[in-house]
Amino acid sequence: MRIAYLDTFSGISGDMTVGALLDLGLPLAAVREAVRALALRDVEIATERVVCSGIGATKFHVRVGGRHPDVPHAAHGHAHRPYVEIRALLEGSPLGERVKRTALAIFRRLAEAEGHVHGVPVESVEFHEVGALDAIVDVVGAALGVVELGIEAVHVGSLPLGQGRTHSAHGALPVPPPAVVELLRGRPVRLEDGAAELVTPTGAAIVAALARPEPVPELRIDAVGYGAGDRTLPDRPNLLRILVGEPAVAVGTDEVLVLEATIDDMSPQLYEHVLERLLAAGARDAFLVPVIMKRSRPATMLRVLAAPADRERLAGIVFAETSTIGLRYTSWRRMVLAREERTVETAYGPVRVKLARAPDGTLNVAPEFEDCRRLASERGVPLKVVHQAALAAAVAPR
């Protein structure tokens, strides 16, 4: 399992995240291609090598109309772009499915936080046009980096929050901004001296959507990337460090939250939307089980598996989207095999596969279904043929 640890000693922002991923080896050309695929007007991206407190790092620049945008707080009465428009842009884009899904999850978190702060439904949230374009590029760049670098799990520790004031379309706001506080609910943070805004809304949304608020397992570091921020901090280098590696020992057990509701009075047509929302919000799995209740009434049990820290947020989605008036929850221990994800070449094209070895040495191989289905459609061959080719390539001597 390839793990990334976000070392946020100076906080985190969207551009710092993309800079660190570029420093780790994400090709700038891939980010440019993703931006081009979104057909964003007047958007230019660039990188530069910088040295901060003697440490070399990558600075990622996004320029909209020739200037660097501000952080995208929600806007009213200015040139703006609605969240629903951003969501439609990402959903209709030709980006890869995992990149698209990851970017949508990050932006959903950002919109939910802004909506909560401003007292409006998430569907009514709007961002500054310039700041929204910057955030779209940062979010898509972060999602692309996670996928391209084969990162399967992201961890983060306590986040440093500065103090003081920052400026937005609504005037002076406290540091940390209200949206950041909403995004980091339930996560360990620490307030530090200084007037700098160390964690931006986009950075906090990336953390909220991708990172587990739990200690990183013992890690064998394979690569390190540094992303530089805009400000000069008096007491530390303004850098985000991302450590990437494999677990030093096989993952043994972990804890998973289980949420359950048994429902007998809801239209079956609604369940697809419920499952999509839960998975987009970070649930590890969500599925339906047919059950027979008292008096032989048929019903459906909704079961959600998630990180323990996500209980309140995911429960809120279940209560909002279903007819249930009660929700059971418990924690389960589970045994987990160490796993590896890599891309194999077949006669039909590249396919991502997951490999895990059981204690007795048995190798389990699972080709990515969407990759196989896409190649089967493109090449006009049966899906099972592509699937078998991926299995053979995965176990072939390297």
Image (cartoon, rainbow, N blue to C red):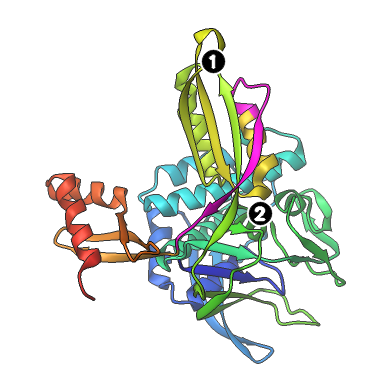
In the rendering, at what x and y percent does residue 140 appear? 49, 57
Quadrant where the N terminus is found in the figure: bottom left
- Which residue is denoted by mark 2 in the rendering? 72
The image quadrant that residue 235 belongs to is bottom right
**Mark 2 → mark 1, Cα distance in angstroms:** 49 Å
| Magenta stretch, residue numbers | 319-337
Instruction: Count neighbours of disc 1 (C-alpha within 10 A) and say few if under 14, some if 14 to 19, many if 20 or more.
Output: few
In the rendering, at what x and y percent does residue 131 appear? 62, 55
**Mark 2 residue type:** Pro
* In the foreground, 97 or 117: 97
Residue 156 shows in the view: yes
**Mark 1 residue type:** Met
Q: Would you say residue 334 sits in the magenta stretch?
A: yes
Residue found at x 35% / y 50%:
94
- Which residue is denoted by mark 1 in the rendering? 293
Q: Which residue lies furthest to the bottom in this view?
A: 54
Residue 127 shows in the view: no
Q: Of helix, strand and loop, which one carries label 1?
A: loop
In the rendering, at what x and y percent does residue 383 appear? 18, 45
In the rendering, at what x and y percent does residue 334 appear? 54, 51
Query: Vertically, is 193 above or below 277?
Result: below
Residue found at x 46% / y 48%:
101
Q: How many labels does the image show?
A: 2
